[in-house]
Image (tube, helix red, strand yellow):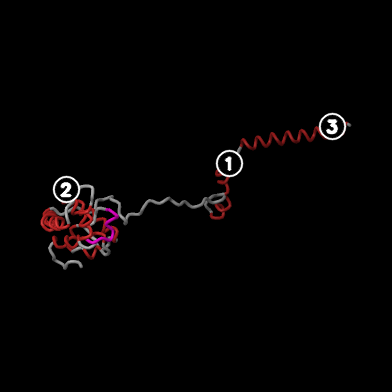
Amino acid sequence: MARSVGAPIEAQLADLSRHEGVMRENLFHLLGSDLRQLWHITPEDSPVLVRRKVIWQLGRLVDQLGDTENKEIARVCFNITGDPELHGMGVVGRKQWLARRQASPHPSESTSSRAMSTEILPTFAHSLRTAPPPAWPEGRPSDSQPRPTAEVLPAPMSNQEALDHGTVAPTELHQRNPAPSGLLAVLGIGLGLLIGVILLAIVDALLR
């Protein structure tokens, strides 16, 4: 459930980390009014764009944390890791998932909870109060921008269609489709040879 208007920023951040974190449905209404204003989220933003803005703003806050372990805890608790294994998990499940990872020692569930309440959330809230974040960068891809598509060109008109639509004058057709002079020359030579052969055959028949 979203916090009421006027709830402290730290409490709004805590709500955002619960349940499925930023992957919850209806994220716009789950955000507190202060976070929506600070993160430049408007009612005109689609659900996809709202989530992208939230993930981007949280990523900026995470990058400001000095402790590597706290960075990992914050990403997991807010569910901005992009790991498909966390899909559908609540915050407790995500903390347990972090504790079970085998690559290297990871914080226990209780350690993650303590770090969130005593270090991460207060740091985030302080940063938002003292250094308001920038807006969504100009030119950054968003679902509101049309994606490039292949240009669809109209089918070319035939000569007769062009005449019917008045887009070309009859005198222009010759300029559009000039006669292939080379081909005509070849055809003329061939026709001349054919006539010559026929005439020779006729003369030969008459002399016999």
Q: Is residue 75 left or right of residue 143?
A: left
Residue 92's spot in the image, x, y percent? 20, 60
Q: How many marks?
A: 3
Q: Residue at x 73, y 33 (%)?
A: 193
N-terminal-most mark, 3 or 1: 1
**Compared to 15, does 55 lie above or below?**
above
Marking on residue 178: 1
Residue nearest the observer in this picture, 26 or 110 = 110
Q: Can residue 93 be seen?
A: yes
Label 3: which secondary element: helix
Q: Is residue 52 left or right of residue 203?
A: left
Residue nearest the observer in this picture, 114 or 176 = 114
Q: Nearer the viewer, mark 3 or mark 1?
A: 3
Q: Nearer the viewer, mark 3 or mark 2?
A: 2
Question: Which amino acid type is shown beneath numbered disc 3?
Answer: Asp
User: Pointer 3: residues within 10 angstroms few (<14), some, or many (20+)?
Assistant: few
Q: Considering the whole magenta stretch, tell me its main secondary structure.
A: loop
Residue 107's spot in the image, x, y percent? 17, 53
Question: Which amino acid type is shown beneath numbered disc 2?
Answer: Thr
Q: Residue at x 32, y 56 (%)?
A: 143
State how far apart marks 3 and 1 are (Cα).
42 Å
User: Pointer 1: residues within 10 angstroms few (<14), some, or many (20+)?
Assistant: few
Marking on residue 204: 3
Asked whether residue 88 is drawn in magenta, I would say: yes
Magenta range: 82-90
Instruction: State the residue position of label 2.
Output: 68
Marking on residue 152: none
Q: Which quadrant, please, contains the N terminus?
A: bottom left
Residue nearest the observer in this picture, 125 or 37 = 125
State how far apart marks 1 and 2 are (Cα).
74 Å
Question: Which amino acid type is shown beneath numbered disc 1?
Answer: Pro
Asked whether residue 131 is drawn in magenta, I would say: no
